[in-house]
Image (cartoon, rainbow, N blue to C red):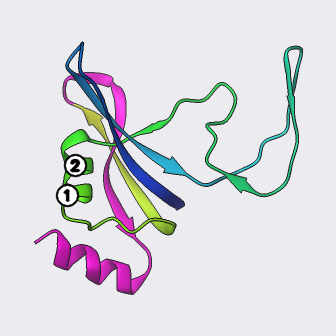
Amino acid sequence: MAIITAVVVKSFPKSGMEIAELSVLRAVETVDVEKFKQRGIGLNTDIPFNKQPIRVNLEYAKKLIDTRAFVPNKEYDLRFDVNIDDPLDVQVKELIPLDEEIKKHFQASLK
């Protein structure tokens, strides 16, 4: 379960590449290394030190955006799958809303 704040599609026109990522609320991490120190309390959308963004299937992300099915700042379960084009790239295949009203909104929007 995660609180998802945004579904973002990023395009790189010169290369023709597109990717989709989720912005997720995470607890602030304490980091204490030679070149960087951080401490705090609360939640943020920063990607933790030495971690990667959470990728989401590009077509699914576009559908969530275009239909307005996605509701930000809500709790979702994440269903993962392997990218067919790159077996080492694990992506979110589906967001599953936990709130009953958001579930209804998803169903109506994604019809």
The residue to which callout 1 is attached is: 66
Amino acid type, label 2: Lys
- The image shows residue 42, relative to residue 45, as above or below, that is below
Number of numbered discs visible in the structure rendering: 2
Q: Residue at x 19, y 29 (%)?
A: 84
Q: Is residue 33 left or right of residue 11?
A: right
Picture layout, residue 110 above or below residue 32: below
Instruction: Please indicate whether residue 4 sits to the left or right of residue 50 in the image.
Output: left
Question: In whole angstroms, how far apart are the C-alphas of marks 1 and 2?
Answer: 6 Å
Rendered residue at 50%/58% (across/down): 5
Give the residue furthest to the front.
13
**Residue at horizontal 35%, vertical 59%?**
95
Mark 1 vs 2: CB contact within 8 A: yes
Image coordinates of residue 105 in percent, x first then y, are 27, 79
Instruction: Please determine whether, in this image, residue 4 is positioned above or below residue 57.
Output: below
Let me know if residue 98 is in the magenta part: yes
Magenta segment, which residues? 84-111
Q: Residue at x 61, y 37 (%)?
A: 47
Q: Which mark is residue 62?
A: 2
- Please state the horizontal and vertical placement of residue 37, each as a whole percent of the image: 88, 28
Name the mark on residue 103: none
Q: Quadrant of residue 43?
A: bottom right
- Within 10 angstroms of label 2, few (less than 14), some, or many (20 or more) residues? some
**Location of residue 6 (image quadrant):** bottom left
Secondary structure at numbered mark 1: helix
